[in-house]
Image (cartoon, helix red, strand yellow):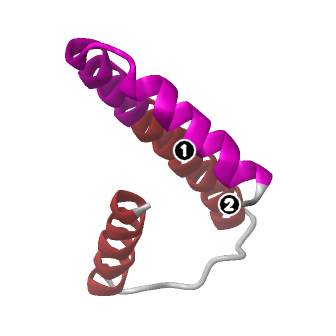
Amino acid sequence: MSPTARTLDEALDMVETLPDEQQEMLIDILHKRRIEKWRKEMAKEASKDIEDFHAGKLEGKSVEEIMRNVRSSSNDSSEA
């Protein structure tokens, strides 16, 4: 077993010792943190894209293509 798997197993074992209410709180906290991480990553990407736009480094795209990319990005992050 790899050290990462062992650490994850230990964490899961520890979480299972918590009361159900605290397990639910932990799930909620982790979910919110993942959302916040995703938002920060998106904001960082957007800032870079704005810089690239102002520098003339971006090529034009149709609205449909942009929306496809947005939806794809959203699906990728929700599957992670």
Mark 2 burial class by Cα count in 10 Å: few <14, some 14-19, many 20+: few
Kindly give the residue lying farthest to the left in the view shown: 21
Picture quarter containing residue 20?
Answer: top left
Which is more toward the observer, 57 or 7? 7
Which is more toward the observer, 13 or 32? 13
Which residue position is annotated with label 1?
43
The residue segment tinted magenta is 3-32
Mark 1 burial class by Cα count in 10 Å: few <14, some 14-19, many 20+: few
- Residue for point 63% across, 77% down: 58
- Residue for point 36% across, 35% down: 31
Q: Which mark is residue 52?
A: none
Q: Horizontal and vertical percent for residue 72?
A: 36, 75
Q: Nearer the viewer, mark 2 or mark 1?
A: 1
Q: Horizontal and vertical percent for residue 45?
A: 61, 55
Q: Is residue 37 left or right of residue 50?
A: left
- Residue for point 72% across, 50% down: 4
Q: Is residue 48 left or right of residue 11?
A: right
* Upstream in sequence: badge 2 or badge 1: 1
From the viewer's perspective, is residue 39 above or below residue 60?
Answer: above
Amino acid type, callout 1: Ala
Magenta region includes residue 6? yes
From the viewer's perspective, is residue 74 above or below residue 25?
Answer: below
Q: Quadrant of the C terminus?
A: bottom left
Picture quarter containing residue 22?
Answer: top left
Which residue position is annotated with label 2?
54
Magenta region includes residue 74? no
Amino acid type, callout 2: His
